[in-house]
Amino acid sequence: MPDKKHFKLPETFDIQGVQIFAPGQWNGDKYTEKDIEELVSAFNETGQTVRPFLKIGHDKEQGLVQKDGMPAVGWIEKLRKVGGKLVADFTKVPKKIFDLIKAGAYRKVSSEIFFNVTVAGKKFPRLLKAVAILGGDTPAVQTLDDIISLYKYKMT
């Protein structure tokens, strides 16, 4: 085990107020503002049990994803509805990923949602699974602001 005096935690950042989802017809499924409210409620009830994570892209064929078991590149800390859209705070984003976001290499996001999942004996019609940050891919929901366009961030 490393000596605590010589072990340095990696530098991470928090990004607050990121739009991650919006009402509309996406990938064949219709979402209303009520669905957004239910996603927030489900998160508040299950957030510590089924904690949504931040990941790079959706591609399951990525070599790194297959080899390393897809490491999280951050966590969803808080979820809320603002102006009809689903908004999240990202926490513990590693500096290398944060620098790429700031530089514009990753500008968009895409939410992944579980359907009809049961947690602790309660069934939820929809539950946020993860948020993918996207570089060259186009998200289904194209009405969201860029990750860094208006958001506050801080080093943690």
Image (spheres, helix red, strand yellow):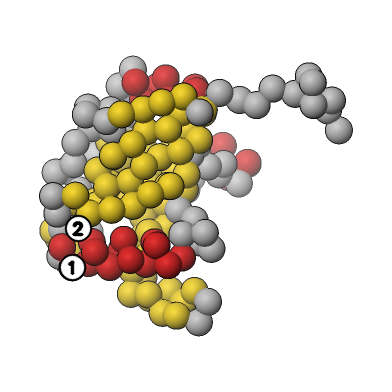
- The residue indicated by pointer 1 is 34
- For the residue marked with disc 2, what is the amino acid? Trp
Res. 120 visible in picture: yes
Q: Position of residue 125 (x, y in %)?
A: 33, 74
Instruction: Residue at 69% x, 22% y: name it.
Output: 8
**Observer-nearest residue: 74 or 82?**
82
Label 1, secondary structure: give it. Answer: helix
- For the residue marked with disc 1, what is the amino acid? Lys
Q: Position of residue 62 (x, y in %)?
A: 50, 40
**Observer-nearest residue: 82 or 56?**
82
Label disc, if present, on residue 102 of the rendered structure: none
Label disc, if present, on residue 26 of the rendered structure: 2
Q: Say if 156 sits above or below 119 in the image.
A: above
Badge 1 local density, few (<14 within 10 Å), some, or many (20+)?
few
Left or right of residue 75: residue 29: left
| Circles 1 and 2: CB atoms closer than 8 Å | no
